[in-house]
Amino acid sequence: MDHEYDVVLVGSGIAGAVIAKTLTQAGKRVLLLEAGLAAGMALSPEPSYANYQRYLETFYSKANKATNGPYPDLPDAQSPDVLQIEAKTPYDEGYLVQNGPLPFASDCLRSPGGTTLHWLGNVPRMLPNDFQMKTLYGQGVDWPISYDDLKPWYEMAEYEIGVSGDVAAQVGPDMDRSNYGDDYVFPMKEIPQSYQDQVWMKNTENLSVSLYGKDYNVTCVSMPQGRNSIPNPAYRKTGIFWNDETKRLELAGDEPGKYEVVGAIWDQNTGNRCEGNASCVPICPVQAKYNALKTLKKSDHSKLDIATQAVVSKLLVNDTTGKLDGIEYKVYANPASPIYTTKVAKGKIYVLAAGALENAKILLSSNAANSSDQVGRNLMDHLVMLMWGLFPEKVYPYRGPGCTTYLPTFRDGEFRKDFAAWISPLDNWGWSWPTFAPGSDVSNGLAAGKFGKALRDSLADTVTRQALLHFECEQAPDPNNRITVSPQYTDLLGNYRPVIQYDASDYMRKSFEAAKKVGDQIFAANGIEDFTDYNPSDADYVTWKNRGYTFWGAGHIVGTHRMGSSPADSVVKPTQQTWDHDNLYLVGCGNMPTLGTSNPTLTMTALTFMAAEAILKQLEA
């Protein structure tokens, strides 16, 4: 381009979209580099609608509705695929190189809109104690900021995503009204809890369970969600803007009842309320669920240039100044061809928003921002242990969003000194996750010789009673869980692929034992017949005290370039600026020092608004 950019930005997921929108609305020129196809970046009504329909048609036609299933599979810009994360390590198949001892079990999406195209949409906040894991429990590290520091940025994130929920209901260990403030409400009212949840709650609310000689009270809480419901007339905020006088990013407005719902990109009257399609993962048919393209569309497009099919290969670091002089990227025309054109993007400030895997890979490929030797390290996820069974009565799963209620009892407590905390969503998806139901129920019925009315009666009896309870266990940071790169492993364009070393510590394995003990008591109280089966042939099968457990990935990819108080043991400052290069910022879940028990997207979005303010201050200076 023949003009200078204020910011060159990599990635159009929610972190990249927030940076693009916030900076362009403040009058800054931004170039956005996106590895995915141009068609996916369509933000005007007709092409956006046509592209999303292609996603849906692909989703409908696939027998296995995996997370990345509806979206283009690009050899030139591959995404990890959960269908390729089902083998014992080591192996080199698909995009990730898995060196083990266990396979990393989560995927993400390299596409316009990023992983928000297939995320579940649960957005609880982290707890205040989550920011002090080392001080309080002797585990992991402390954050360089506190919950109170992040609190105003959480409010911006909840505005941007359009959170539906009931603040008053968010009560549990280290969690009550004081976490939010006396008068605070979410932008939209809570999504109604499903009929199945109401059956769960009859015998689960205030249930006393015993664990290692201590009694705990189980409660059921409505889940805050990033999907449209009904605007809350008490909500008072109307927008986020850069205040030139105070040099601060501010959440503006003080008039109730003015929140505007953002519907589908192609039509604001479509997707302005969740319709309960129960396909939030991998795709919301009407875009009632938030995705990053909604934020990107609100950018000032006179200040934003977007280069699609542009795969970043290297950061150009000036050896004398330590600053970045540019970003090298490869532009492909055919996503299945090794032919590309190399270009260089230049700006005053550079921002990587490509996700925890890609950000780390780009930094390692460039020998950048790694004086601490922490780039790629401390890779984390929620390790999900599932339990499934049959209710004694029909509860009718597969209706509504994937989760409308969760159990907060083990999100925090002194037990965190000994084993990992967890959050327990009550899933509305039957046995779809562990057994690929209901398709597998049909297959099993046919294999048993059931046809016609006999098959229909069998399905009507079992599918309608399916119960799924899962435990998202917080993984502690471990420097040996990491991403590296090697010339031995490259993609079609010659760029590095992530090489992963990964394991589950004893701290995690004991949490599986603890969670199963709690789950057994919850199942018994509800009269649920347990069909849970952890098979030694499962890729992520582990043992603890001679008992076996299988975990799944949550898609919550965190760590790899964590923030901290010192350049000796972290990659970025609390502002998300790298210690090593003062014109390079990293945004995304990779900056999080620990994971807590909440889905990380809300926290990552809050941190991104914090970074946007720091970038604007630096540009102003």
Image: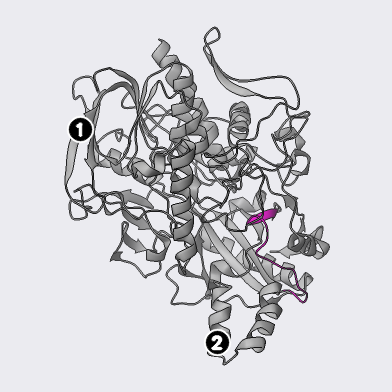
Q: Quadrant of residue 459?
A: bottom right
Q: CA distance from mark 2 to mark 1?
A: 56 Å
Instruction: Decide: few, some or many residues near mark 2? Use Cα within 10 Å; few <14, some 14-19, many ≥20.
Output: some
Query: Is residue 563 at all visible to an observer of this figure?
Result: no
Using the image as rendered, state which of residue 436 and residue 548 is in the foreground.
Answer: 436
Residue 140, position as x, y percentages in the image = 50, 45
Q: Secondary structure at mark 1?
A: strand
Using the image as rendered, state which of residue 330 and residue 152 is in the foreground.
Answer: 330
The label shown at residue 446 is: 2
Q: Give the amino acid at mark 2.
A: Leu
Q: Is residue 110 above or below residue 304?
A: below
Q: Main secondary structure of the magenta part?
A: loop
Q: Is residue 104 above or below residue 4?
A: below
The label shown at residue 343 is: 1
Q: Quadrant of residue 519?
A: bottom right
**Position of the C terminus by quadrant:** top left
Using the image as rendered, state which of residue 214 and residue 116 is in the foreground.
Answer: 116
Left/right of residue 598 with respect to residue 301 in the rendered view: right
Residue at image point 44% right, 57% down: 70
Residue 385, position as x, y percentages in the image = 56, 64
Q: Is residue 308 above or below residue 396?
A: above
Bounds of the magenta span? 391-405
Q: Secondary structure at mark 2?
A: helix
The label shown at residue 188 is: none
Q: Quadrant of residue 398?
A: bottom right
**Position of the N terminus by quadrant:** top left
Q: Give the amino acid at mark 1.
A: Lys
